[in-house]
Structure formats: structure tokens, C-alpha cells
Image (cartoon, rainbow, N blue to C red):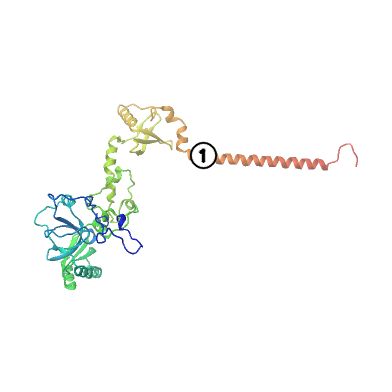
């Protein structure tokens, strides 16, 4: 998810947006928020001094620019955190920060920490050295968890820039007693340890990946609020209840099942509920398929393999008549169309065309064989007559 000017020139060096190698609109960041006010002059009377800072794996928090630092989107800054300092990158500035705070229910009060300074080369170098400890620490921590036989999955480790604290992200189905684990980790790595439990959807968002649609996971690119997804969403959309197809990489139902659910719910308001077969003079007709957006319902008889399309208005009329104890002559208003063999040709037109094609080909072949056989008979008869002597003459 990068902008057009962030592509590389020769395949080696990124061109960047002329803003310290990052996108000024935030389009190159994980879980980005597009700043569509970046090219507009900001009003002085409504200046917002709160800045959104991005940390590892898209984690974002809000900090106050109390020192009036001249910072832009993408700058590395050193911020105040409990018991130390941390290094992050500016992901959003200006008036849109207020909207993000309102969306995430963050209040503008004294609890918001301040930005110390713009990161120096020394701060950046130290931060890189600290990040190099994360992978070995995670591997060793997983070995300790296996030794303690804890039912938990360690997903990620994030070190603070001052190398004094590390946050361990894990997921677990049940409650875990990790008091002994904290002692082992703090004694081996000589740091303060914070255990933070995350859900399986958050775990998939931190790890990232490609979904079944071929695009990057929504939870790792833009989705931050995870709403509950139930199997009713699949039923309303007439999807097969196959867990392998409905589940995402997190093992839970896909979040995208809720995207079009409201549209289907509005369309289903005009669809009648058919709980039993429709009664006709031909026999009971059972519901086979429903086309929600075309307002068409397909019914079939027990002695017929064809399905007959019926409009939702007509279905409501038949249900009302059946409740009164009356049977209709046919499913559709025009009885001739419903009972004519044209329905078979329309539904099975491809099979009928194949039958005609091969039947014509067989007739041609049989006609050719008959003609060839007749020619053979004529030629053989002529030869036999020429070899016989004429009558009345002696040889």
C-alpha cells in the first residue's frame, strides 16, 4: 500500500515522497490513516498539538507536541513512556488526529504523554541494536514456555528503545498463570517484563499474510475494530456452511462476512418466508433456490427435475391462497408458460444443442455409408454382367 511516488527507480533504492523516505499521507504505513488534509493550510485557531505515533507492527498511540517541535509525517521521535522512553514514527498530524481520538475513545487530558525530541542518529542506532535482540529473545522465550508446559502461544516481542523493558504478546484459549514465566524471563534477559494477551484476530493482524481473495489481510492493513461474526451472516447470504471456506487465517470466521451483511438484510425484507411447500393442482412445489437481488424464487416438483422461477409477489399470493385452503392452477400467472416444454429447452438448452449436433452428424455418416454401399453394389453388378456371355450365342 504505497503511493505512486514511493516506488523504486532502479529496483534498489526507494524514491520516497521527499519526506525522509516515507509517505506524507501515511499511505506506506501498516494500518495507515490517509491524511487527506495534508496539502491544505491548517487554521491557526484550531491547531491540534496531539500527534499519532506508530510503533512496531502498526501499534499506534497519541502523544502531545508540547515543545512545539517542527516534525512532519514519517519523522522518528523519542516519546515519553512509563519507566523510560521509546522511539516511534509520526503517522498522522493535524485535525484528523481529533477524529482518530474520537474513534478510539481517547480523551484529551493530562494522561497523554509528551514527545521529548526528534530522534538523533545515536538514538536510531541504539534502537536498531535493541531490535536485533527481539528474535533471539522470542525463540528462547518459547523454549522456556515449552519447559514450563504453559498452554499459550507467544506471538511477538517488542523491546523498548531504552533497552529497559520488553512487551511479550501472546494468545491463549484459557487463563494462564505466568508468574513463574515472568521470573524466568526477567532473570535471564535482565529486563522488566510485561505480558500482554491479544486475540487471535489481533495475532493474525500483527503477523500479516495474504487472504483467500489474493489481497493482504484486512486486519493487518486497515481494520482495527474487530466485530463479532456469527454463522447467521453466512446463512443470510446463502453461503455454504463450510468451516474451511468461511474461516480466515486466524481460525475464526472471516471479518469480511459482515461487509455486505446490511445490504443482504435490506434485500431480504421483501423476500417471503417459505416454511412449507406451495400447494398447486399439479402437486406440492418445494423451494430450491432464492435469488435475493432479482427477487426470484425457484421451485421444483417431486416428479420433475426442472426448476421454475417465480417472482416474490406471486409467491406471496400463493401463500395467501394456501392459507385459505385454495390450490392454484400453476406457479406462474401464465399457466401455458409454466407447463410448456419450452421451460425444458430454456433450462437445458446446452444439452439439447449437443444432442442435435451429434444426431445430425450420425445421420450424415449413415447417409454416406448408404451411398457408398449402393455404389459398390452397382459396380459389382456391372462387372458381373460384363463377364457373362450374351444369351442365344454359342461360344
Residue 206 lies, with reference to residue 229, above or below; the image says below
Give the labeled residue for mark 1. 353
Q: Nearer the viewer, residue 338 or 324?
A: 338
| Quadrant containing the N terminus in the rendered view | bottom left
Q: Nearer the viewer, residue 326 or 200?
A: 200
Q: Residue at x 33, y 32 (%)?
A: 315
Residue 328 lies, with reference to residue 390, above or below; the image says above
Residue 268: which quarter of the image? top left
Percent of width and height locating residue 3 = 30, 55
Q: Nearer the viewer, residue 237 or 64?
A: 64
Residue 389: which quarter of the image? top right
Local crowd at mark 1 within 10 Å, few (<14), some, or many (≥20)? few
Residue 311 lies, with reference to residue 50, above or below; the image says above
Residue 162 lies, with reference to residue 393, above or below; the image says below
Residue 369: which quarter of the image? top right
Percent of width and height locating residue 63 = 14, 58
| 245 left or right of 340 in image | left
| Quadrant containing the C terminus in the rendered view | top right
Amino acid at each position: 500500500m504505497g503511493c505512486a511516488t514511493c516506488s523504486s527507480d532502479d529496483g534498489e533504492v526507494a524514491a520516497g515522497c521527499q519526506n525522509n523516505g516515507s509517505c506524507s499521507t501515511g499511505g506506506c504505513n501498516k494500518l495507515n490513516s490517509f491524511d487527506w488534509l495534508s496539502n491544505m493550510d491548517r487554521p491557526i485557531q484550531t491547531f491540534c498539538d496531539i500527534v499519532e505515533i506508530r510503533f512496531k507492527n502498526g501499534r499506534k498511540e497519541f502523544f502531545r507536541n508540547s515543545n512545539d517541535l517542527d516534525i512532519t509525517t514519517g519523522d522518528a521521535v523519542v516519546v515519553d513512556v512509563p519507566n523510560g522512553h521509546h522511539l516511534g514514527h509520526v503517522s498522522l498530524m493535524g485535525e484528523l488526529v481529533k477524529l482518530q481520538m474520537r474513534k478510539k475513545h481517547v480523551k484529551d487530558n493530562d494522561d497523554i504523554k509528551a514527545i521529548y525530541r526528534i530522534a538523533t542518529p545515536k538514538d536510531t542506532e541504539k534502537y536498531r541494536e535493541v531490535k536485533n535482540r527481539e528474535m533471539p529473545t522470542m525463540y528462547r522465550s518459547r523454549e522456556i514456555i515449552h519447559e514450563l508446559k504453559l498452554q499459550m502461544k507467544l506471538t511477538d516481542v517488542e523491546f523498548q528503545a531504552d533497552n529497559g523493558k520488553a512487551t511479550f504478546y501472546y494468545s491463549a484459549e484459557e487463563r494462564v498463570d505466568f508468574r513463574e514465566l515472568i521470573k524466568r524471563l526477567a532473570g535471564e534477559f535482565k529486563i522488566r517484563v510485561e505480558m500482554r494477551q491479544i486475540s487471535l484476530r489481533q495475532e493474525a493482524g500483527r503477523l500479516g499474510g495474504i487472504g483467500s481473495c489474493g489481497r493482504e489481510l484486512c486486519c493487518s492493513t486497515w481494520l482495527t475494530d474487530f466485530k463479532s461474526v456469527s454463522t447467521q451472516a453466512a446463512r443470510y447470504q446463502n453461503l455454504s456452511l463450510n468451516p474451511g471456506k468461511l474461516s480466515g487465517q486466524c481460525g475464526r470466521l472471516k471479518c469480511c462476512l459482515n461487509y455486505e451483511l446490511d445490504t443482504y438484510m435490506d434485500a431480504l425484507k421483501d423476500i417471503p418466508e417459505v416454511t412449507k411447500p406451495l400447494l398447486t393442482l399439479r402437486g406440492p412445489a418445494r423451494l430450491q433456490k432464492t435469488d435475493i437481488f432479482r427477487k426470484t424464487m425457484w421451485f421444483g416438483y417431486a416428479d420433475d427435475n426442472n426448476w421454475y422461477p417465480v417472482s416474490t409477489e406471486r409467491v406471496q399470493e400463493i401463500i395467501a391462497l394456501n392459507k385459505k385452503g385454495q390450490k392454484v392452477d400453476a406457479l406462474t400467472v401464465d399457466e401455458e408458460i409454466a407447463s410448456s416444454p419450452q421451460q425444458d429447452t430454456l433450462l437445458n438448452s446446452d444439452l439439447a444443442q449437443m444432442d442435435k449436433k451429434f444426431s445430425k452428424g450420425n445421420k450424415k455418416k449413415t447417409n454416406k455409408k448408404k451411398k457408398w454401399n449402393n455404389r459398390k453394389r452397382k459396380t459389382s453388378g456391372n462387372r458381373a454382367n460384363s463377364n457373362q456371355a450374351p444369351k442365344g450365342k454359342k461360344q
